[in-house]
Image: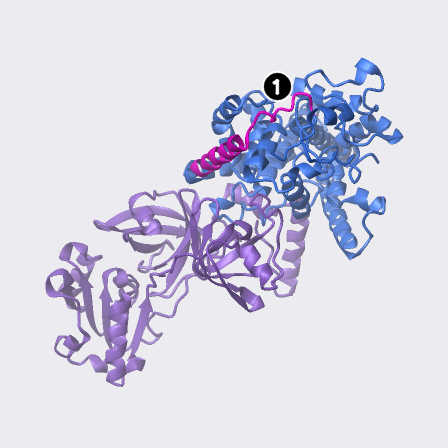
Amino acid sequence: MTTIEAGVPGRGTRLRGGVERALAAVTTPLLPSDYLDVIDPLRSGAGLRGRIESITPETADAVTVVIRPGRGWRGHVPGQYVRIGIDVDGVRLWRAYSLTSGPRADGRISITVKAIPDGVVSTHIVRRARPGTIIQLDQATGDFHLPAVAPRRVLFITAGSGITPVMGMLRHRLAELADVVAVHCAPSPADVIFSAQLADMAGSGRIRLIMRHTSTDGILDPAELDHLVPDWTARQAWGCGPTGLLDALEERWTANGVADQLHTERFRAHVLVTGEGGEVSFGRTGTVVAADGSTPLLDAGEAAGVLMPSGCRMGICMGCILPLESGAVRDLRSGAVTTAVPGDGVKVQTCVSAAAGPCELDI
Amino acid sequence: MTVIQRRTDNPVEHLTDADIQAIGRELDALRAEVFASLGEEDAAYIRRVIKAQRLLEMGSRGVLLFSVFPPAWIVGTVGLSVAKILENMEIGHNILHGQWDWMRDPDIHSTTWEWDNAAPADMWKHSHNEVHHRYTNVVGRDNDLGYGIMRVDEDQRWTKLTLGQPLYNVVNMILFEYAIAAYDLELGAYYKGKKPVDEDFTRDGRRVLGKIGRQVRKDFLLNPALAALVNPFSAVPAFAATLAANVVANLARNVWTHSVIMCGHFPEGVATFSKTSIEGETKGEWYVRQMVGSANISGSSALHMMTGNLSFQIEHHLYPDMPSKRYKDISPRIKDLFERYDLPYVTGPLPKQVFSAWHKVVRLALPNNAFGRFNRAPAWVKPSSAQAAALTMTVGETPAPEGDDSLAA
């Protein structure tokens, strides 16, 4: 259920607040929005959602998803990403994707998703999602974008789906960019997302495109930049791709004393260590304890003096639920592992869950 | 085994420890199987029910704005009654059990849901999920056995006040949502001085009163007032008609939910347990207690929906956090388990079960066997406790205490 946010006091908001309270008195214990959501989930004032309007293949394992955001969408700066919540097998999962859409009069936005092996959400979006699906949205965020005044000389270095935020920038601001070099790496020509549009931009001379097919040419070594882009130290650079590539770029830029000219975006493949037991942090209490794989988090917290909410202690009353901020826990009944990354706040029953790696509970 | 069944035909007496372990393993495996198969269809189901309920409620309230016209009054009142019942049973009760928590949808989650009922959700979750579902049918522990105002088991103490319990139950039925709120607040224990009136009570009491106030304002003031506004030339009759409709809808919901819930554990043939019998109880024994401590209602899909699938009370008590939609699917397998272990699967149509529960309330208003045949339990159910204790007491156990900290006014 949504909560009414306290507005800044002012005559308008006070009046609106009064109307909202009056309506809420009629709909209690729900809020008016709970009823309105049934009719129009994308209306203004609703929790931010979007509707998938189309899904178009880019490569064999990547698609572009066009989304009509709800009225509360505040727009984005090209290069930023958006967190989306989508129901996969009935379970809501959140992931972040770069916005790839260019300027659109109809206000639609798009993300481009590449199915990664074992990627539950990306695989679902690429293989199974259908137009018409309602998804949850957060506002766009991230500081991987061009400055308001475009730099004279720009270098983009991307690999794989790392092209996605850069394509967002190119589609919006290519006209302002006088001198662009784009170095893009992908295993083979068939794996290049946006290959037609990149070729088009290169063909008309608006960018200099350097394609690197890593399955035949090997991965990019930043040392090669000296002959690929001789003036690279004179350029503002934006890099996006796997951690290995970004680490290598940062090393090179730092070695040349131009680290402040490099901007990177890391698509963290949150590698979660899962195993038996782990270090459990009890959020705001500051308590951290090592717990084994068979001790319920509830017991571990109580033993450490944390005031844990509790109930039946057998997994049926839901009185002990806390949000898992990050890390991995295992359900002691089924063995199923639940993971979370910051922002997820997946709620877990602490009386029947044990640490399956380092984890943090919000308490 | 630790279960003491004070019946001449103790329904679990023939089970060996190995049997109980095997039952536990089988039920754990079934649970795992169902939870692993939860998916899109289940999620779509609960969203569909919520959507339908909200549309029905909005539609009914819309129609009731014109309830000065008798056909509108009838349609609106029936619609609102059904909407309230769906909201409390298939939606509220089940969401508050955490049956849909696996979806990770913050709008349909046991920690965020609030229901259209006088009892605040979190207080109800404590008394229902934590106490009743854990201590199901344990005399002196499970306050749902008579709700602290009635004697529904031979082993509960009889006093002169018990004579009035058929009347208490009628009042309880009519005011059920408020009775539940008072019950969650443990009003009885405070009243009797068993719990000191402290800050907790003041705080919880304020919350209950606040919730009741908001509910009353919505149903009995604002909605009738809206009808009066819409019908400026017959404002008073419009207010009165809509108020009456809301009163009837609340009453219908109270009577219906009370009846369904009585059928869960009160009908004849359902077993109860002594406090000592659950000391050191294993998971298998807990399952067996739920199996013989609950009763189902047979009927159509519509009946199951309107009872929030509490018609599958046995399945619900085995797996309180399993999505209600699945109870029907696993029911044949649960029944088969009962048959294989020769356990009584108590079930029957709604009128029969309601009658059986009421019969027990009336019968036990009198002392055990006070009037010979009239208030004796059917032969297959239960002899007097002293007689039963002598017959089936497990060696080394002491007699169960006479429900001293439970009921009987």
Chain B shade in the render: blue
| Residues shaded magenta | B7-33
Q: Nearer the viewer, residue B341 or A332?
A: B341
Residue at 56%, 34% (x, y): give it: B318
Q: Circle 1 sits on which residue? A: B348
Is B19 contained in the magenta span? yes
Horizontally, residue B406 falls left or right of residue B304, namely right
Quadrant holding the N terminus of chain B: top right
Q: Nearer the viewer, residue B220 or B323?
A: B323
**Residue A319 image position (x, y, % from top left):** 61, 49
Tell which chain the image draws in purple.
Answer: A
Q: Is residue A47 visible?
A: no
Quadrant in the rendering for residue B386: top right
Q: Is residue A45 visible?
A: yes
Residue A100, relative to residue A147: is it above or below? above
**Residue B397 image position (x, y, % from top left):** 70, 35
Quadrant holding the C terminus of chain B: top right
**Residue A260 image position (x, y, % from top left):** 31, 81
